[in-house]
Image: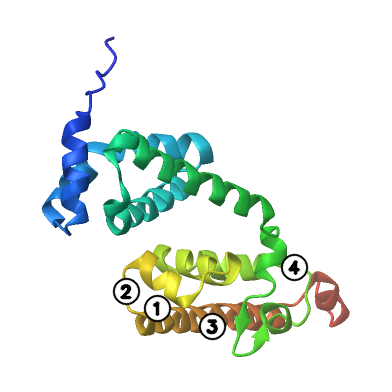
Amino acid sequence: MSRPVRTAIDGETLSRLVAATAEQDQAAFAALYDLTKRRLFGIALTVLRRRDLAEDVLQEAYIRVWRNAARFDPARGAALTWMATIVRNLAIDVKRSAAATPSEDTALMVIPFNGRSALDEIEASDDVRRLRRAIEALDPMRRKLVIAAYIQGQSREQLAERFGAPVNTIKTWLRRAVIDMRAALAAEHTAGAHATSPVEHRAVGGK
C-alpha cells in the first residue's frame, strides 16, 4: 500500500501570499490558508495531542497571521517557518495553560449562576456529576462556550473573537446555556426528591 505523497510548498509563493495578506487581500489569505493548513495543524497536534485544542490553536494562529503579516520579513526566513513558529508558540502556551488549569471537578464547582456558584446551586453536594451531566446535556457549541468562559476563564471579548460573534451575542448564548443548566439541575433535584429509597419504602410498609 503506497503512502500519500506530501506536496511540496513553494516558499516564494507563500512569501507573495503573506505580502498580499499584509495588504488585506482576503483571496490571498484564503490561498495561504489552503496551502498551509495541513502542515500547521500537524505541528499543533504534535505538541498538544488533542484535535480540539489543535483546531483552536490553528484558528488563533491564522488570526495572528492576518493581523501581523506586515511584520513578516522574507530576508529573515521562509514564510512557512514564520507561520510554523506562531503555531508552535501558541500550542506550547496552551499546553502550559492546560497543565496549570484546576482539575475539572474543582473547576466545575465554581461556575456562577446569577451570583451563586454551582456549589451553592446543588446545596454543597460533593457529587459534581450532576453538574457535569448538565453541561454535557448542552448542545456542542454551548458546551464549548461554557467551558471556555467558566473553566478556562476566557473573557467575553476573547470568546467573541474565538466564536466569531458580537460580545452581546456571546452574553446571550451564555445566559441561555446557564438557564438550560439550571433547569437540568432543578429537574434532577426534583426527581431525586420524589424518589423513595429502599429503606424508606420498607419503613412505610413496602416489601
Residue, x 41% and y 45% (percent of image)? 86
Query: Which image quadrant for residue 163?
Result: bottom left
Q: Is residue 49 visible?
A: no
Residues tagged 1 and 2 counted as in contact (Cβ below 8 A) = yes
State the residue in front, 12 or 135: 12
Question: Residue under circle 2?
Answer: 165
Chain-order first, disc 1 or disc 3 = 1
Residue of label 1:
170
Can the viewer see residue 182? yes
Tell me if residue 76 comes above or below residue 31 in the rendering. above
Q: Secondary structure at mark 4?
A: loop
Answer whether labels 4 and 2 touch (C-beta < 8 Å).
Answer: no
Crowd class of label 2 (few under 14; some 14 to 19; many from 20; radius 10 Å): few
Question: Which residue appears farthest toward the top when viewing the image?
Answer: 1
Task: Give the residue at the far bottom of this rendering.
Answer: 114
- C-alpha span from label 4 to label 3: 17 Å
**Pointers 4 and 3 in contact (CB under 8 A)?**
no
Q: Position of residue 71 (x, y in %)?
A: 32, 51
- Mark 4 to mark 2 CA distance (whole Å): 34 Å
Coloured how?
rainbow
First in sequence, mark 1 or 2: give its number.
2
Along the polypeptide, which appears first: circle 4 or circle 2?
4
Q: Position of residue 127 (x, y in %)?
A: 74, 68
